[in-house]
Amino acid sequence: MLHPMMASAGLLAILMPGIYQPVEPELAVLTLGEALDQRLVSVEPVSLGGHSGDCVALHIQNHSMRPMTLSLPAGTVFEPANGEDQSLVVPVERQLALSGRSSETLPAAAFCTEMGDASPAEEGGFALGRTANPLLDSLFGYLALHPSLASEHNVLQNAIWAITDNSDVGSIYAEGQPEVTKFREWICKLTGRENVWYNTVLDTRLDEERRIVRTAVSVQGQVMLNRRESLTLQGHVENEQGEVVWSFERANRLPAGTLRFRFSLEVEGWQSGGYALVYKSGTEEIIRQEFRI
């Protein structure tokens, strides 16, 4: 039988400081800016050498004993130390989980807002800011309601450039994804631009000076025709000078009625500018649909 005094001593030992350590409760979720203002953390944003996607590393120190979750809000801007480099913006909020008294390196998804500037150099530093562009704020609000778009990095980048650099909306495209189609229509309404009938597939790379080079690889779209009589059509593509630069190998006999058919053309190596897809029946022009690459 255990002596009562021994039982009490055992209980005291369990409760003695140093043997029992209470777990500090996690702090309420703060934005990264709020945590910086309260000096709970320090952060050093560093470029990973890209201009879209997970291209920023956040070196964060939690000075508090408590674990915390920080919010990196949509609209956060990474301003480069080198003024010739691009500013990057965060389009979708990200949660950053930190242990107490820890140093963490966490990735941040951010996207270029200045297509004409150089892509940030690897290990280049940033200052934190906030976008002042109301159209970007509207875009980020849309993305918050449509979270599946967050993983479409090419779509997001081209949508941001459509706002910040007035780039062609035809590149806001993903094969077989109706949500992206609706997103492009929404971008056109937001920016007051007319949607285009075609999709442009682009190859995007950096040159030796870290400048963005975008090259059209193909143009795709649907062509609609409504005729009361059948007819034979011969198609070609003209440049802005009216010169034929490409032709279908043979004419096609089409029945009467409403028809939709797919147009797809490889344009890699073509000169940038305006073109027109033209279909003729004999000498009569039946269809003319313009596109740009």
Image (cartoon, rainbow, N blue to C red):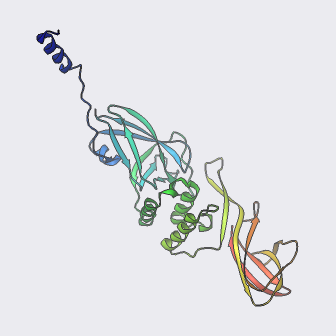
Furthest residue in direction left, as rendered:
5
Image quadrant of residue 61?
Answer: top left
Up-down relation of residue 36 to residue 93 (above or below): above
The residue at the point 26 percent across, 43 percent down is 38
Could you tell me residue 257's position as x and y percent? 74, 85
Where the N terminus falls, by quadrant?
A: top left
Report how many numbered discs are placed on residues in the image.
0
Q: Is residue 150 left or right of residue 27?
A: right
Q: Is residue 226 left or right of residue 147?
A: right
Furthest residue in direction bottom, as rendered:
228
Could you tell me residue 132's position as x and y percent? 40, 61
Q: Is residue 2 visible?
A: yes
Q: Is residue 113 visible?
A: no
> Which one is nearer the viewer's eye here, 126 or 193?
193
Image quadrant of residue 3?
Answer: top left
The residue at the point 74 percent across, 65 percent down is 271
Q: Is residue 206 left or right of residue 241?
A: left
Could you tell me residue 235's position as x and y percent? 81, 77
Could you tell me residue 256's position as x and y percent? 78, 86
Furthest residue in direction right, as rendered:
250
Up-down relation of residue 87 to residue 219 (above or below): above
Furthest residue in direction front, as rendered:
1
> Which one is nearer the viewer's eye here, 182 or 72?
182
Where the C terminus falls, by quadrant?
A: bottom right
